[in-house]
Amino acid sequence: MSSPGGDPARGDLACDLDLLVLGEVNPDVIVSAPGLEVRFGQVEQVVDRAAFVLGGSGAIVAMGAARLGLRAGLCAVVGHDDLGALMVGSLVERGVDVEHVGSVSGVATGLTVVLDRGGDRAVLTAPGAIAQLSPDDVDALPDRPARHVHVASYYLMSPLYRAALPNALRRFREAGVTTSLDTNWDPHETWDLGDVLAHTDVFLPNENELTAVAGTPLVDRAMGVLAGLGCDVVVKRGKHGGAARVGGRGYRLTRTPPVEFVDAVGAGDTFDAGWLAGRLTGRDPATSLTMAVVAGTLSTAAPGGTTAQPELSEVEPWLRTLRPVEADYAGEADAEDPW
């Protein structure tokens, strides 16, 4: 990702935000118990832990980026209800700009229930106002709403919004804005992205999303397929770290900081925030990948995606001790998969 003009650490001072996230904000209700199996028939089950936290992939990325020192904002829609007001207030408390967060009447704020049984989880989302983000909302943004625009939760949004994204991203890029995309899981498992990647500088999937979109089970080959579309590819690998393919170079980090693990809810979104914070403050791809892996890993020390998000001072010491392995893929059309 290039730094668009001005001071690489701060960018164009005429632009108020370093990062604007297009996505969603909603509460997450996280229910955790080892080996959890939900039983119907009005059976009451006792679980180890339940938490109510601010969530939504878009909000988690924005808050994680703000914790890491970026001027971050969110473009999203909530319901005109108590939950919506609570979510917006929480964003403001975390230093996220909410100028582009709207509310609608007659539609409830979205809500996600996460059933976590340790090592695996089910995610149940009532979209509510999440899918109310519209082409009109995006069209109303200035050509340069931030130095970088990140698209979150692509598959949770309305078909009209998704169809309008390529033109919107093209408009932003023509104004010198860089762009990124994290689809999250496709509930319909069609994995259709249209031509949105043609207007995306960085694609940030996890391994399962990467291989599904690319149509191959081989991670390295899938990265090559998508990099061939012209975008950088940065992949989340959970406890196995992460990998990136930027231009003709590859980067792989398999070590992670030690952490007393609680859950991985939202860890991938904090990973995104770490990568974006690294690149938007002028760091090289290897260092940015380390920031992403460290930030995502540290965020797993508390329930939900935002409670344990690290500050930059907590991430920086690891930049001196963790370093990705590099590989040169220039001119290599179809690498053997070493994963």
Image (cartoon, rainbow, N blue to C red):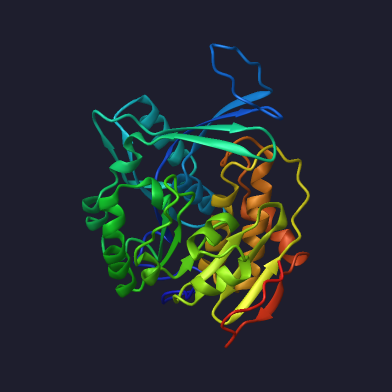
Query: Is the C terminus in the top left, top right, bottom left or bottom right quadrant?
Result: bottom right
Residue 166, how many percent across, how many down?
Answer: 31, 65
Which of these two is toward me, 201 or 35? Answer: 35
Q: Is residue 281 above or below residue 125?
A: below
Is 323 on the left-hand or right-hand side of 222? right
Total tally of numbered discs in the picture: 0
Q: Is residue 144 above or below residue 71?
A: below
Q: Is residue 281 above or below residue 189?
A: below
Residue furthest out toward the bottom: 331
Residue 300 found in image quarter? top right
Q: Is residue 207 visible?
A: yes
Q: Is residue 283 visible?
A: no
Which of these two is toward me, 97 or 102? Answer: 102
Q: Is residue 141 above or below residue 187?
A: below
Which of these two is toward me, 273 or 229? Answer: 229
Residue under the point 54% across and 61% down: 210
Residue 51 found in image quarter? top right
Residue 89, how many percent across, how many down?
Answer: 41, 34
Residue 257, how many percent across, how many down?
Answer: 76, 53
Residue 106, how many percent across, how many down?
Answer: 24, 28
Residue 265 found in image quarter? top right
Residue under the point 42% across and 46% down: 188
